[in-house]
Image: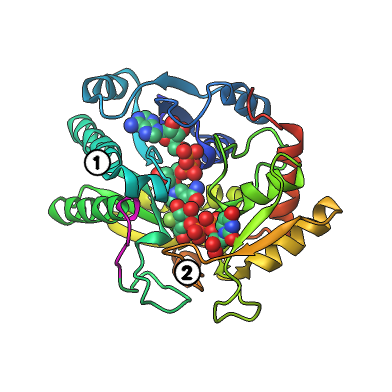
Amino acid sequence: MEKFTLVTGGTGYIGSHTSVALMEAGYQVVIVDNLVNSSKKILSRIEQITGSAPVFIEADLRDTSTIIEIFSDYPITSVVHFAGLKAVGESVEEPVKYYDNNLGSTLSLLDAMALSEVSTLVFSSSATVYSSSEIAPFDEAAELGPTNPYGMSKYFIEQILSDIALGDDEWSIGLLRYFNPIGAHPTGLIGEMPTGIPNNLVPYIMQVAFEKLEKLFIFGDDYETPDGTCIRDYIHVVDLARGHLAALQFLEDANGSHVWNLGTGKGSSVLELVKMVEEVVGKPIPREVVGRRSGDIPVVFADVEKALNELSWRAENTLMQMCVDHWNWQRQNPDGYQ
Ligand code: NAD
Ligand code: UFG
Protein backbone atom coordinates (compact mmCIF):
# COMPACT_ATOMS: atom_id res chain seq x y z
CA MET A 1 0.00 0.00 0.00
CA GLU A 2 1.21 3.50 -0.80
CA LYS A 3 2.22 5.61 2.17
CA PHE A 4 1.23 9.24 2.45
CA THR A 5 2.74 12.24 4.19
CA LEU A 6 0.34 14.91 5.41
CA VAL A 7 1.65 18.41 4.71
CA THR A 8 -0.28 21.01 6.69
CA GLY A 9 -0.01 24.51 5.20
CA GLY A 10 1.26 22.85 2.02
CA THR A 11 -0.09 25.51 -0.36
CA GLY A 12 2.00 28.15 1.46
CA TYR A 13 5.49 29.36 0.59
CA ILE A 14 7.70 26.80 2.36
CA GLY A 15 5.07 24.03 2.38
CA SER A 16 4.73 24.11 -1.42
CA HIS A 17 8.49 23.87 -2.00
CA THR A 18 8.69 21.04 0.54
CA SER A 19 5.76 19.22 -1.09
CA VAL A 20 7.71 19.36 -4.36
CA ALA A 21 10.85 18.00 -2.66
CA LEU A 22 8.88 15.18 -1.01
CA MET A 23 7.08 14.25 -4.22
CA GLU A 24 10.33 14.26 -6.17
CA ALA A 25 11.74 11.88 -3.54
CA GLY A 26 8.82 9.48 -4.10
CA TYR A 27 6.50 10.47 -1.22
CA GLN A 28 2.74 10.66 -1.76
CA VAL A 29 1.59 14.02 -0.42
CA VAL A 30 -1.76 15.05 1.07
CA ILE A 31 -1.98 18.80 1.62
CA VAL A 32 -4.41 20.31 4.10
CA ASP A 33 -4.71 24.09 4.11
CA ASN A 34 -7.51 26.59 4.81
CA LEU A 35 -6.05 29.01 2.19
CA VAL A 36 -5.96 31.90 4.67
CA ASN A 37 -2.59 32.91 3.20
CA SER A 38 -2.30 30.92 -0.03
CA SER A 39 -4.05 30.00 -3.26
CA LYS A 40 -5.37 26.74 -4.66
CA LYS A 41 -3.88 27.77 -7.99
CA ILE A 42 -0.49 26.63 -6.74
CA LEU A 43 -1.60 23.00 -7.11
CA SER A 44 -1.37 23.05 -10.90
CA ARG A 45 2.06 24.70 -10.61
CA ILE A 46 3.22 21.85 -8.35
CA GLU A 47 1.86 19.42 -10.93
CA GLN A 48 3.79 21.21 -13.69
CA ILE A 49 7.02 20.78 -11.71
CA THR A 50 6.58 17.23 -10.43
CA GLY A 51 4.33 15.67 -13.08
CA SER A 52 1.55 14.87 -10.60
CA ALA A 53 -0.78 16.80 -8.34
CA PRO A 54 -0.77 16.29 -4.58
CA VAL A 55 -4.07 15.42 -2.90
CA PHE A 56 -5.57 18.68 -1.61
CA ILE A 57 -8.10 19.13 1.16
CA GLU A 58 -9.34 22.60 2.02
CA ALA A 59 -9.86 22.61 5.79
CA ASP A 60 -8.93 24.44 8.93
CA LEU A 61 -6.65 22.33 11.09
CA ARG A 62 -8.62 23.35 14.17
CA ASP A 63 -11.55 21.37 12.77
CA THR A 64 -10.42 18.17 14.50
CA SER A 65 -13.16 15.89 13.17
CA THR A 66 -12.23 16.73 9.55
CA ILE A 67 -8.56 16.11 10.31
CA ILE A 68 -9.39 12.76 11.89
CA GLU A 69 -11.35 11.89 8.73
CA ILE A 70 -8.33 12.73 6.57
CA PHE A 71 -6.26 10.27 8.59
CA SER A 72 -8.88 7.58 8.11
CA ASP A 73 -9.20 8.28 4.35
CA TYR A 74 -5.47 8.07 3.56
CA PRO A 75 -2.75 5.74 4.90
CA ILE A 76 -0.75 8.62 6.36
CA THR A 77 2.47 7.63 8.12
CA SER A 78 4.08 11.02 8.77
CA VAL A 79 3.26 14.72 9.02
CA VAL A 80 5.10 17.91 8.12
CA HIS A 81 3.37 20.74 9.96
CA PHE A 82 3.70 24.21 8.40
CA ALA A 83 0.21 25.61 8.94
CA GLY A 84 0.24 28.76 11.00
CA LEU A 85 0.13 32.52 10.97
CA LYS A 86 3.53 34.22 10.80
CA ALA A 87 3.38 38.03 10.81
CA VAL A 88 5.28 39.23 13.88
CA GLY A 89 3.71 42.72 13.93
CA GLU A 90 0.16 41.40 13.55
CA SER A 91 0.81 38.94 16.38
CA VAL A 92 1.59 41.84 18.72
CA GLU A 93 -1.69 43.53 17.79
CA GLU A 94 -3.80 40.35 17.80
CA PRO A 95 -2.12 37.87 20.16
CA VAL A 96 -5.23 35.76 20.74
CA LYS A 97 -5.63 35.18 17.00
CA TYR A 98 -2.05 33.86 16.90
CA TYR A 99 -2.31 31.66 19.97
CA ASP A 100 -5.68 30.34 18.86
CA ASN A 101 -4.57 29.55 15.32
CA ASN A 102 -1.04 28.29 15.91
CA LEU A 103 -1.59 26.41 19.16
CA GLY A 104 -5.16 25.35 18.32
CA SER A 105 -4.06 23.90 14.96
CA THR A 106 -1.21 21.97 16.54
CA LEU A 107 -3.29 20.53 19.40
CA SER A 108 -6.00 19.47 16.96
CA LEU A 109 -3.42 17.83 14.69
CA LEU A 110 -1.83 16.03 17.66
CA ASP A 111 -5.24 14.66 18.71
CA ALA A 112 -5.87 13.30 15.23
CA MET A 113 -2.35 11.85 15.00
CA ALA A 114 -2.66 10.11 18.38
CA LEU A 115 -6.04 8.62 17.43
CA SER A 116 -4.62 7.37 14.14
CA GLU A 117 -1.38 6.15 15.72
CA VAL A 118 0.78 8.34 13.50
CA SER A 119 3.78 9.51 15.49
CA THR A 120 6.34 10.97 13.05
CA LEU A 121 6.18 14.76 12.88
CA VAL A 122 8.32 17.57 11.48
CA PHE A 123 7.44 21.01 12.84
CA SER A 124 8.20 24.49 11.42
CA SER A 125 9.79 26.46 14.19
CA SER A 126 11.81 29.62 13.86
CA ALA A 127 15.08 31.26 14.87
CA THR A 128 12.84 33.81 16.53
CA VAL A 129 12.60 31.44 19.54
CA TYR A 130 16.21 32.32 20.50
CA SER A 131 16.80 34.93 23.17
CA SER A 132 17.96 38.33 21.92
CA SER A 133 20.71 38.24 24.54
CA GLU A 134 22.43 35.38 22.69
CA ILE A 135 25.37 36.12 20.41
CA ALA A 136 25.54 34.71 16.86
CA PRO A 137 26.15 32.06 15.72
CA PHE A 138 23.15 30.55 17.51
CA ASP A 139 23.43 26.82 18.18
CA GLU A 140 20.48 24.69 19.21
CA ALA A 141 21.49 24.82 22.89
CA ALA A 142 21.37 28.63 22.96
CA GLU A 143 19.02 30.23 25.44
CA LEU A 144 15.43 30.64 24.28
CA GLY A 145 13.35 33.76 24.86
CA PRO A 146 11.01 34.94 22.13
CA THR A 147 9.82 38.53 22.39
CA ASN A 148 6.47 38.51 20.56
CA PRO A 149 3.31 36.35 20.51
CA TYR A 150 4.24 34.75 17.18
CA GLY A 151 7.60 33.65 18.59
CA MET A 152 5.95 32.58 21.85
CA SER A 153 3.51 30.39 19.92
CA LYS A 154 6.48 28.59 18.33
CA TYR A 155 8.19 28.29 21.72
CA PHE A 156 5.07 26.83 23.37
CA ILE A 157 4.56 24.34 20.54
CA GLU A 158 8.20 23.24 20.77
CA GLN A 159 7.65 22.67 24.49
CA ILE A 160 4.44 20.69 23.94
CA LEU A 161 6.06 18.51 21.29
CA SER A 162 9.14 17.85 23.46
CA ASP A 163 6.86 16.85 26.36
CA ILE A 164 4.94 14.44 24.13
CA ALA A 165 8.12 12.77 22.92
CA LEU A 166 9.36 12.53 26.51
CA GLY A 167 6.14 10.91 27.72
CA ASP A 168 5.80 8.34 24.94
CA ASP A 169 8.80 6.99 23.08
CA GLU A 170 6.70 5.98 20.06
CA TRP A 171 6.89 9.61 18.94
CA SER A 172 9.58 10.86 16.62
CA ILE A 173 9.54 14.64 16.34
CA GLY A 174 11.77 17.16 14.57
CA LEU A 175 11.74 20.85 15.51
CA LEU A 176 13.21 22.83 12.62
CA ARG A 177 14.33 26.35 13.44
CA TYR A 178 14.43 28.26 10.18
CA PHE A 179 16.49 31.37 9.74
CA ASN A 180 15.46 33.69 6.85
CA PRO A 181 13.97 31.77 3.91
CA ILE A 182 14.06 33.61 0.57
CA GLY A 183 14.22 32.72 -3.12
CA ALA A 184 11.85 30.60 -5.16
CA HIS A 185 11.79 27.41 -7.19
CA PRO A 186 14.25 27.74 -10.11
CA THR A 187 11.39 27.20 -12.60
CA GLY A 188 9.81 30.43 -11.37
CA LEU A 189 6.51 28.54 -11.02
CA ILE A 190 6.19 28.73 -7.24
CA GLY A 191 7.39 31.35 -4.76
CA GLU A 192 6.25 33.72 -2.07
CA MET A 193 3.69 36.39 -2.88
CA PRO A 194 2.78 38.33 0.23
CA THR A 195 -0.63 39.97 0.26
CA GLY A 196 -0.41 43.74 0.71
CA ILE A 197 2.86 45.48 1.46
CA PRO A 198 5.55 42.93 2.35
CA ASN A 199 6.95 42.94 5.91
CA ASN A 200 10.14 41.12 5.01
CA LEU A 201 13.20 42.57 3.37
CA VAL A 202 13.58 40.50 0.22
CA PRO A 203 9.95 40.52 -0.97
CA TYR A 204 9.97 44.29 -0.33
CA ILE A 205 13.19 44.88 -2.33
CA MET A 206 11.85 42.76 -5.18
CA GLN A 207 8.71 44.88 -5.40
CA VAL A 208 10.87 48.02 -5.45
CA ALA A 209 12.95 46.48 -8.25
CA PHE A 210 9.71 45.69 -10.08
CA GLU A 211 8.59 49.31 -9.53
CA LYS A 212 5.51 48.22 -7.59
CA LEU A 213 6.90 50.09 -4.58
CA GLU A 214 8.76 53.37 -4.79
CA LYS A 215 11.73 52.77 -2.52
CA LEU A 216 13.15 50.59 0.19
CA PHE A 217 13.24 51.91 3.74
CA ILE A 218 16.33 50.57 5.52
CA PHE A 219 15.56 50.24 9.21
CA GLY A 220 18.73 51.64 10.75
CA ASP A 221 22.36 51.92 9.63
CA ASP A 222 23.83 52.65 13.04
CA TYR A 223 24.11 49.10 14.38
CA GLU A 224 27.43 47.70 15.51
CA THR A 225 28.00 45.78 12.29
CA PRO A 226 30.59 46.43 9.53
CA ASP A 227 28.22 48.59 7.43
CA GLY A 228 25.82 49.56 10.23
CA THR A 229 22.86 47.50 8.94
CA CYS A 230 21.46 44.30 10.48
CA ILE A 231 22.84 40.92 9.55
CA ARG A 232 20.67 37.86 8.85
CA ASP A 233 21.17 34.28 7.68
CA TYR A 234 19.27 34.08 4.37
CA ILE A 235 18.57 30.56 3.12
CA HIS A 236 17.22 29.44 -0.25
CA VAL A 237 13.73 27.98 0.16
CA VAL A 238 14.70 24.98 -1.98
CA ASP A 239 17.58 24.17 0.41
CA LEU A 240 15.12 24.56 3.28
CA ALA A 241 12.73 22.14 1.55
CA ARG A 242 15.56 19.59 1.19
CA GLY A 243 16.22 20.05 4.90
CA HIS A 244 12.67 18.86 5.66
CA LEU A 245 13.18 15.77 3.55
CA ALA A 246 16.44 15.01 5.38
CA ALA A 247 14.74 15.52 8.75
CA LEU A 248 11.79 13.31 7.82
CA GLN A 249 14.09 10.52 6.62
CA PHE A 250 16.05 10.75 9.89
CA LEU A 251 12.86 10.65 12.00
CA GLU A 252 11.51 7.60 10.18
CA ASP A 253 14.32 5.58 11.83
CA ALA A 254 14.45 7.37 15.17
CA ASN A 255 12.42 8.31 18.19
CA GLY A 256 12.36 11.18 20.67
CA SER A 257 12.43 14.89 19.85
CA HIS A 258 15.24 16.52 17.94
CA VAL A 259 15.96 20.12 17.12
CA TRP A 260 17.91 21.43 14.15
CA ASN A 261 18.76 24.89 12.88
CA LEU A 262 18.20 25.31 9.16
CA GLY A 263 20.31 28.17 7.89
CA THR A 264 23.49 28.65 5.89
CA GLY A 265 25.68 29.63 8.84
CA LYS A 266 26.60 32.82 6.99
CA GLY A 267 25.28 36.29 7.72
CA SER A 268 24.59 39.03 5.16
CA SER A 269 23.75 42.65 5.89
CA VAL A 270 20.78 44.59 4.53
CA LEU A 271 23.16 46.64 2.36
CA GLU A 272 24.93 43.56 1.02
CA LEU A 273 21.59 42.14 0.01
CA VAL A 274 20.52 45.38 -1.65
CA LYS A 275 23.76 45.43 -3.67
CA MET A 276 23.29 41.80 -4.67
CA VAL A 277 19.77 42.50 -5.92
CA GLU A 278 21.05 45.55 -7.84
CA GLU A 279 23.54 43.30 -9.59
CA VAL A 280 20.87 40.74 -10.44
CA VAL A 281 18.25 43.21 -11.72
CA GLY A 282 20.83 45.48 -13.36
CA LYS A 283 19.57 48.75 -11.91
CA PRO A 284 19.81 50.73 -8.68
CA ILE A 285 17.30 50.11 -5.87
CA PRO A 286 16.01 53.47 -4.61
CA ARG A 287 16.38 53.52 -0.83
CA GLU A 288 16.28 55.66 2.25
CA VAL A 289 17.70 54.96 5.67
CA VAL A 290 15.11 55.47 8.42
CA GLY A 291 15.02 54.69 12.14
CA ARG A 292 15.51 51.26 13.64
CA ARG A 293 12.56 48.84 13.64
CA SER A 294 11.56 47.97 17.16
CA GLY A 295 12.61 44.48 18.23
CA ASP A 296 15.30 43.97 15.55
CA ILE A 297 18.43 42.15 16.71
CA PRO A 298 21.67 43.38 15.05
CA VAL A 299 23.23 40.03 14.13
CA VAL A 300 21.46 36.70 13.63
CA PHE A 301 23.00 33.68 11.97
CA ALA A 302 22.95 29.95 12.59
CA ASP A 303 25.42 27.41 13.79
CA VAL A 304 24.64 24.66 11.28
CA GLU A 305 26.94 21.88 12.49
CA LYS A 306 24.19 19.80 14.13
CA ALA A 307 22.12 19.50 10.95
CA LEU A 308 25.24 18.69 8.97
CA ASN A 309 26.40 16.00 11.43
CA GLU A 310 23.03 14.38 12.08
CA LEU A 311 21.13 14.90 8.83
CA SER A 312 24.04 15.15 6.37
CA TRP A 313 22.27 18.24 5.13
CA ARG A 314 23.71 21.62 4.34
CA ALA A 315 22.41 24.63 2.40
CA GLU A 316 24.03 24.81 -1.03
CA ASN A 317 22.67 27.85 -2.85
CA THR A 318 24.55 31.16 -2.77
CA LEU A 319 22.99 34.50 -1.91
CA MET A 320 23.30 35.37 -5.61
CA GLN A 321 21.26 32.28 -6.59
CA MET A 322 18.62 33.15 -3.99
CA CYS A 323 18.27 36.64 -5.51
CA VAL A 324 18.26 35.34 -9.11
CA ASP A 325 15.50 32.83 -8.35
CA HIS A 326 13.45 35.29 -6.30
CA TRP A 327 13.65 37.89 -9.08
CA ASN A 328 12.78 35.32 -11.73
CA TRP A 329 9.66 34.37 -9.76
CA GLN A 330 8.72 38.02 -9.17
CA ARG A 331 9.07 38.89 -12.85
CA GLN A 332 7.12 35.88 -14.09
CA ASN A 333 4.32 36.36 -11.56
CA PRO A 334 3.82 40.06 -10.91
CA ASP A 335 0.43 39.33 -9.35
CA GLY A 336 1.24 36.03 -7.71
CA TYR A 337 -1.02 33.14 -8.69
CA GLN A 338 -3.72 35.37 -10.20
P1 NAD B 1 2.70 30.75 4.56
O1 NAD B 1 1.75 31.70 5.17
O2 NAD B 1 3.07 30.93 3.13
O3 NAD B 1 2.18 29.25 4.76
C1 NAD B 1 1.41 28.85 5.87
C2 NAD B 1 0.17 28.14 5.34
O4 NAD B 1 -0.63 27.72 6.45
C3 NAD B 1 -0.71 29.03 4.47
O5 NAD B 1 -0.93 28.39 3.23
C4 NAD B 1 -2.00 29.19 5.27
O6 NAD B 1 -3.11 29.31 4.44
C5 NAD B 1 -1.99 27.94 6.12
N1 NAD B 1 -2.73 28.00 7.39
C6 NAD B 1 -2.61 28.94 8.37
N2 NAD B 1 -3.45 28.65 9.39
C7 NAD B 1 -4.09 27.50 9.05
C8 NAD B 1 -5.08 26.70 9.69
N3 NAD B 1 -5.60 27.03 10.89
N4 NAD B 1 -5.54 25.60 9.06
C9 NAD B 1 -5.05 25.27 7.85
N5 NAD B 1 -4.12 25.98 7.18
C10 NAD B 1 -3.64 27.09 7.79
O7 NAD B 1 4.01 30.76 5.47
P2 NAD B 1 5.44 30.11 5.22
O8 NAD B 1 6.42 31.21 5.06
O9 NAD B 1 5.36 29.03 4.20
O10 NAD B 1 5.69 29.49 6.65
C11 NAD B 1 5.39 28.14 6.94
C12 NAD B 1 5.68 27.87 8.40
O11 NAD B 1 7.05 28.18 8.67
C13 NAD B 1 4.85 28.73 9.37
O12 NAD B 1 4.50 27.94 10.47
C14 NAD B 1 5.82 29.82 9.77
O13 NAD B 1 5.53 30.31 11.05
C15 NAD B 1 7.15 29.08 9.76
N6 NAD B 1 8.30 29.98 9.55
C16 NAD B 1 8.34 30.81 8.46
C17 NAD B 1 9.42 31.68 8.29
C18 NAD B 1 9.47 32.61 7.11
O14 NAD B 1 10.26 33.56 7.16
N7 NAD B 1 8.71 32.40 6.05
C19 NAD B 1 10.47 31.69 9.22
C20 NAD B 1 10.41 30.82 10.31
C21 NAD B 1 9.31 29.97 10.46
N1 UFG C 1 14.38 45.46 6.83
C1 UFG C 1 14.51 46.72 6.31
N2 UFG C 1 13.47 47.21 5.55
C2 UFG C 1 12.34 46.49 5.29
C3 UFG C 1 12.23 45.18 5.82
C4 UFG C 1 13.28 44.70 6.60
O1 UFG C 1 15.51 47.39 6.51
O2 UFG C 1 11.45 46.99 4.60
C5 UFG C 1 15.49 44.91 7.62
C6 UFG C 1 15.07 44.55 9.04
O3 UFG C 1 15.19 45.65 9.88
C7 UFG C 1 16.06 43.43 9.37
C8 UFG C 1 16.33 42.75 8.01
O4 UFG C 1 15.91 43.69 7.03
O5 UFG C 1 17.25 43.98 9.81
C9 UFG C 1 15.55 41.46 7.82
O6 UFG C 1 14.18 41.69 8.13
P1 UFG C 1 13.03 40.64 7.81
O7 UFG C 1 11.75 41.22 8.28
O8 UFG C 1 13.12 40.19 6.39
O9 UFG C 1 13.44 39.36 8.69
P2 UFG C 1 13.58 39.18 10.27
O10 UFG C 1 14.90 38.54 10.50
O11 UFG C 1 13.25 40.39 11.01
O12 UFG C 1 12.39 38.14 10.57
C10 UFG C 1 12.26 36.91 9.87
C11 UFG C 1 10.79 36.49 9.83
C12 UFG C 1 10.30 36.12 11.18
C13 UFG C 1 11.18 35.09 11.77
C14 UFG C 1 12.62 35.53 11.77
C15 UFG C 1 13.47 34.38 12.19
O13 UFG C 1 10.00 37.55 9.35
O14 UFG C 1 9.02 35.57 11.08
O15 UFG C 1 13.02 35.92 10.45
O16 UFG C 1 14.79 34.74 12.28
F1 UFG C 1 10.80 34.84 13.03
Vertical side of 53 occupied by 267: above or below: below
Q: Residue at x 32, y 18 (%)?
A: 73
Quadrant where the image shows the N terminus: top left
Instruction: Find residue 33 and report its image quarter.
Output: top left
Amino acid at circle 1: Val
Vertical side of 130 occupied by 223: above or below: below
Closer to the camera in the image, 138 or 93:
93
Amino acid at circle 2: Asn
Closer to the camera in the image, 252 or 121:
121
The reply, left or right, for residue 85 in relation to residue 48 is: left
Q: Position of residue 110 (x, y in %)?
A: 23, 38
Q: Position of residue 75 (x, y in %)?
A: 34, 25
Circles 2 and 1 in contact, beta carbons < 8 Å = no
What residue sits right under mark 1 in the picture?
A: 96
What residue sits right under mark 2 in the picture?
A: 309
Residue 150 painted magenta = yes
Closer to the camera in the image, 162 or 93:
93
Q: Residue at x 45, y 26 (%)?
A: 35
* The residue stretch that appears in magenta: 144-151
Disc 2 packing (10 Å; few <14; some 14–19; many ≥20): few
Q: Which residue of the protein is positioned furthest toward the left in this rendering?
A: 167
Distance of label 2 from label 1 (alpha carbons): 38 Å
Among numbered discs 2 and 1, the one appearing first in the sequence? 1
Disc 1 packing (10 Å; few <14; some 14–19; many ≥20): few
